[in-house]
Image: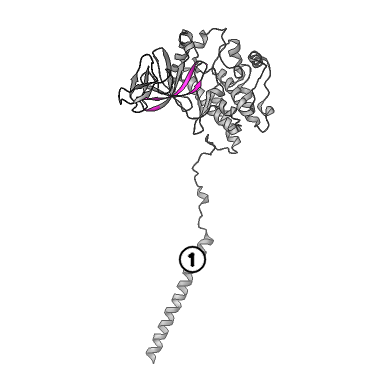
Amino acid sequence: MKFSCSHCGGITEVGVIESEYVGCGHCEEVVEVPKNRFDKGAVIAGDFVILEQIGIGGMGLVFKAHQISLERIVALKILKDSFSQDEKFINGFITEARSAAKLRHSNIVQAYAVGYDEGVFYIALEHVEGPTTAQMLLQNHRFSEKEVLKISIEISEALEHGWEKSQLLHRDIKPDNIMIDKAGNAKLMDLGLACPYNESLNEDEDEVLGTPQYISPEQLTGQLMDFRGDHYSLGATLYHLLTNEFPFNGEDASQTAMMHLNDPLTPPNQTKKNISEKFSNVICKMMAKSPDDRYRTSQELIHDLKACYAQLSGSKRKVRLDGKPTRTRSRRKESAKPKSTPDRAHKQSVPHQNLLKYGTIAIVGLFVIIALVKSV
């Protein structure tokens, strides 16, 4: 096992751990040896120093780590030991890395590197400082309609980018997979179930991928899925964030799944008051049972979401996602510029006429005085 010296940062390698402390091979200081491969200070692939565990997913553990070669903080996802010998799970783990690496978008968590090191499969990802929307719900955060609209626009644009670039499907949109960074921007993460459109044709029809509260009907029935399935799951996620309730909530996962297939959706504005009818209608369209009744393109969806945002902001002008209207340069009409009129020109000439009049009188008077003086 390799670990980083807490004094000099040098990498030291130890075999069988016989003592809690060893001398650093670089600075010769006595340092504490990490208790296991993933303890603080342990080094993965000679480049990633484990700092702390920050999460756990369905397929792996997530650590905050320092990448030595590029001097940056990353999120390092490690495949669980229970799955490391399973070829199917390993392929899914690698698929996640390849899917994320293809995408460059401000609202998608970026993948940096993927590899294998002494029995450990790992993927290094962009480290995002901030909570997931699921964590915010657990902390009793109540999302405003404007917040949810902002999230919906940004995640929709991320999904559009993935589909347009490589026909990529996420297949597991939910609050746990949406992070909010320090700047308030939404980022789509955890592509563990993502797969290209053509790969979805070859999957086992008996296997259902997704989360029951947000899963699309076509995922449950094994039908061919495209980007409209992600729209459905995003709609279910927005419903939850907006109302603080699941769109469908049965006694167990199986009953909840069947409700997605058979039960009518209660519109969000009937579940919670003060939600605009326009946004409520958009979510209902996203969650239509049949894909043919949903939005035909992501661009159409984004257009309607932005229209909802603009309406909520009380302006027909374009609105930035931070809530501020964009500045537009206005040209002054020529008619707005004051123009001289005959009356005004006449008024402006009056002082000049008076000056000429009194000046003439003064000159005549001067000549009269001179004439009188000569006569005397």
Q: Nearer the viewer, residue 356 or 108?
A: 108
Residue 143 versus residue 365: which sits nearer the camera?
143
Q: Does 290 sit above or below residue 373?
A: above
Q: Nearer the viewer, residue 66 or 90?
A: 66
Secondary element type, mark 1: helix
In percent of the image, x 63 and y 27: which residue is there? 244
Most extreme residue toward the bottom, as rendered?
A: 376
Q: Position of residue 149 (x, y in %)?
A: 57, 30
Task: Identify the main secondary structure in magenta.
Answer: strand
The residue wearing badge 1 is: 349
Instruction: Give the residue at x 52% y 50%.
Output: 335
Quarter of the image with the C terminus in it: bottom left
Q: Is residue 361 positioned above or below 161 on the image?
A: below
Q: Residue at x 67, y 33 (%)?
A: 274
Using the image, determine if residue 251 lies above or below residue 178. above
What amino acid type is highlighted by mark number 1? Ser
Q: Nearer the viewer, residue 275 or 303?
A: 275
Q: Which residues are magenta?
A: 53-72
- Residue 94 in the image, given as x and y percentages of width and height: 44, 14
